[in-house]
Image (cartoon, rainbow, N blue to C red):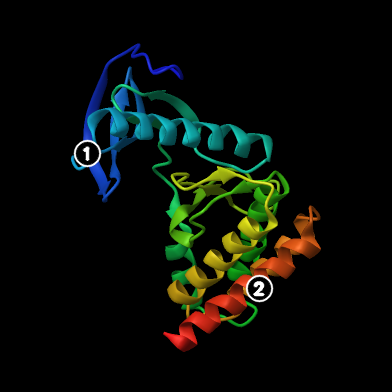
């Protein structure tokens, strides 16, 4: 596997993990190393040449997202390579990681008010999103289903027994537009309210941490976020 799309080894598929409208995720063995493979489907309704072009662009965009996240000190699975001809992205398989959504749901059973597990994770989420935006990276699909908690043997830099790992960069792009960052925050707020209604203060905890870790155009971003939120509420009221 190489970044230029050439194939340099053999890949043996282990099993399908997830399949959606855009593609599928499965575990594979590549030259003795277990990895996660993301394979994009061919869209039959598109002209083959257009479909090939769009798929290549999106895979390359994801590849750039991994590189930019590394520069922004945002943890992601290691990118092992891409195969443009096969429409595949190969990345590190974190088989011991827990989805952040499940972790929050389980922690909430112990109580939500001032729960240290929830407060600590909110701090980590705010820090990661703040680092993304301070480097002009728009994730595009910020949900706790797109965040993994990867256990570590020794405490991480944050003092926690896990690393927060951001995943799924299919909608990620680079932008200097503060409204794009405001929309990213609004998507996160709606996702948290929907998935974690039992912890209604979760987004405010995340936002507090975000403000501490992103000083890049912060006033303008928060102003745009408030505008986007107001428009979203108005649409909800009107129907």
Above or below, 232 against 210 in this view is below
Q: Is residue 198 visible?
A: no
Helix, strand or loop under label 1: strand
The part of the image, by quadrant, that contains residue 35 is top left
**Which residue in the protein does label 2 denote?**
227
- Determine the CA span between mark 1 and mark 2: 44 Å
Above or below, 176 against 191 in this view is above
Q: Give the position of the N terminus as an image quadrant.
A: top left
Above or below, 9 against 74 in this view is above
Q: Is residue 191 left or right of residue 174?
A: left
Residue under the image location 69 percent in, 49 percent down: 131
The part of the image, by quadrant, that contains residue 222 is bottom right
Q: Position of residue 159 (x, y in %)?
A: 69, 53
Mark with earlier residue (1, 2): 1
Comparing 140 with 103, the one in front is: 140
Label 1 crowd (10 A; few <14 / some 14-19 / many >=20)? few
Q: Nearer the viewer, mark 1 or mark 2?
A: 2
Helix, strand or loop under label 2: helix
Above or below, 216 against 4 in this view is below
Residue under the image location 39 percent in, 29 percent down: 56
**Which residue in the protein does label 1 denote?**
15
Q: Is residue 61 left or right of residue 183?
A: left
């Amino acid at each position: 596997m190489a970044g230029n799309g050439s194939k340099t080894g053999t890949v043996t598929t282990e099993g399908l993990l997830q399949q959606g409208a855009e593609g599928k995720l499965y575990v594979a063995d590549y030259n003795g190393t277990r990895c996660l493979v993301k394979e994009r489907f061919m869209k039959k309704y598109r002209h083959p040449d257009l479909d090939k072009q769009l798929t290549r662009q999106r895979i390359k965009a994801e590849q750039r997202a991994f590189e930019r996240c590394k520069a922004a000190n945002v943890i992601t699975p290691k990118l092992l390579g891409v195969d443009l001809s096969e429409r595949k992205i190969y990345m590190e398989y974190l088989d011991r990681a827990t989805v952040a959504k499940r972790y929050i749901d389980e922690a909430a059973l112990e109580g939500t008010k001032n729960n240290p597990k929830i407060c600590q994770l909110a701090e980590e989420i705010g820090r990661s999103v703040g680092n993304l935006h301070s480097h002009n990276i728009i994730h595009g699909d910020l949900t706790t289903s797109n965040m993994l908690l990867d256990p570590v043997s020794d405490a991480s830099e944050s003092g926690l027994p896990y690393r927060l790992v951001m995943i799924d960069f299919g909608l990620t792009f680079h932008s200097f537009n503060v409204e794009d960052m405001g929309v990213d925050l609004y998507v996160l707020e709606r996702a948290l309210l929907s998935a974690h209604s039992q912890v209604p203060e979760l987004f405010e905890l995340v936002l507090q941490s975000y403000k501490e870790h992103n000083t890049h155009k912060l006033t303008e971003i928060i102003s745009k976020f408030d505008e986007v939120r107001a428009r979203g509420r108005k649409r909800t009221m009107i129907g």
